[in-house]
Image: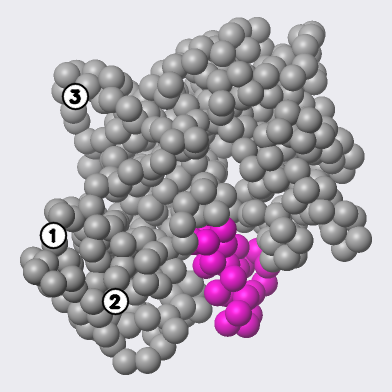
Amino acid sequence: MPALWYTKQWYTRCLDAPAVSPRRDPVTTPTQPTGTATVFHDVRLPSGGPAGELIAVDGLLVDAVPPGAVVERVDGGGRLALPTLVDAHIHPDKTSWGEPWHSRRPARGIAEYVAGDVELARALPTPVAERALRLMSHAAAQGTRAMRAHADVAPAYGLSGIEGVAAAAAQLAGVVDVELVAFPQHGVVRTPGVAELLAEAAASGLVTHIGGIDPAGFDAEGAGEGDQLGTVFGLAERHGLGLDIHLHDRGETGLAPLRDIAARTRALGLQGRVGVAHAFAVAGLSARELDETADLLAGAGISLTTVALSETTILPFRRLAERGVRVGLGSDGVRDSWSPFGDADMLHRAWLAGWAVDARLDEDLEACFRLAADGGAELLGLPKADLRTGSPADFMLVDGECLPQVVVDRPRRELVVRAGRVVARDGRLV
């Protein structure tokens, strides 16, 4: 994808714009003009049956065109309509997507990966705002309607990652909704200055969440003193923000912080506003231990995100959902210093989830798609885009036979619709 170039005036204007709104505020998405109905005809639904119509009015799907409405018609060409997807965990600030190839060095442990992040950031000539916009635009054109984006906050970057991703989010307003996490990848305890930068980010009005990382492992090492969870929970409570904490540690090193997070969440009344990413320790639990942990998380209103890295790390999302835990799916890093892989295509990520759980049956493949669609929507507090009357007019059209086949074959997104407006054709934003 070619580089995108913008003027200094554009960048300043984006930084001044209200790029993202805290969870406590409703998200508003521009729709087609008032008094207009858009009729997408000759489309098929995943439930089967002959081709029919989807009618969008004021960003929602309706049964019929209102009297007196101006009608715009879009030919679906007999394609299959599917809900658009939600990326519940992505790092747009780190990406080298669309940049010259970057050769990665060997890395052992988070500290060495973090050093690689700084090295790559200094080597890339393109500002964060342009790289993030390029990646987020690509994601939207592949059918992503919303995302939770993490941006590193550390002395090496200051708040440039937050500001860059916020600028990209402002440019994409009405196309993709963005929740923005101030993420302390370098650690709150082990890296001096991070706690102060998190406080600055929390007060900036740009972020919706404060992040955290491995308080019993990575961020407990070194000479630093302090309480990471106390810091990030305090900031979230003080500024009315959510929390999204990365837990890579396995075994008791990962489970003990998870229990601590649940206890703090209940004590501060933050149920429904705290999420944990990766949670590799949960992926390794036996059936009884899994149910007990799931009940603990559900009782505290804590959500989880998984990124389908492998069969040993993907969360047992169906079992967790049955116990009342909200689980979303995400891209994680996309062509960053950690890995050359990733493409911010959530349909591909659903395919990876299917591969990781060895999905064979249609219902298993459909569950992976629903994880990327409904699971992510619930996690971000968005209504399901399930193509029912009254649901958001957010869908994509593909050449496909049925939903399981689409997950396996990952056809091109011929058309992407957001709030009743066509926002992308043939994999590119309109």
Which region shows up in magenta? 349-376
The numbered dot on residue 63 is: 2
Which residue extends farthest bottom? 50
Residue 329: image tag? none
- At x 84%, y 38%, the residue is 259
Distance of label 3 from label 2 (alpha carbons): 41 Å
Q: Residue at image x 34%, y 74%?
A: 81
Q: Residue at x 42, y 80 (%)?
A: 46
- Above or below — where is 268 with respect to 301? above
Separation (CA) of disc 3 from disc 1? 32 Å
Q: Residues within 10 Å of mark 1 (few under 14, many from 20)?
A: few
Q: In terms of secondary structure, where does tag 2 sit?
A: loop
Whichever of labels 1 and 2 marks the residue nearer the N terminus, that label is 1
- Residue 10's label in the rendered image is 3
Number of residues whose C-alpha sits closer than 10 Å to that of mark 2, classed few (under 14), some (14–19) or many (20 or more): few
Q: Are marks 3 and 2 in contact (CB under 8 Å)?
A: no
Q: Which three-letter amino acid code belongs to the residue tagged 2?
A: Asp
Task: For marks 3 and 2, give the one nearer the viewer.
Answer: 2
Horizontal and vertical percent for residue 204?
A: 44, 17
Q: Closer to the N terminus: mark 3 or mark 2?
A: 3
SS majority, magenta:
helix
Residue 17: x and y in percent read: 28, 25
Q: Amino acid at mark 3?
A: Trp
Q: Do tag 1 and tag 2 residues touch (Cβ < 8 Å)?
A: no
Viewed as shown, does residue 295 lie left or right of 141? right
Q: Which mark is residue 35?
A: 1
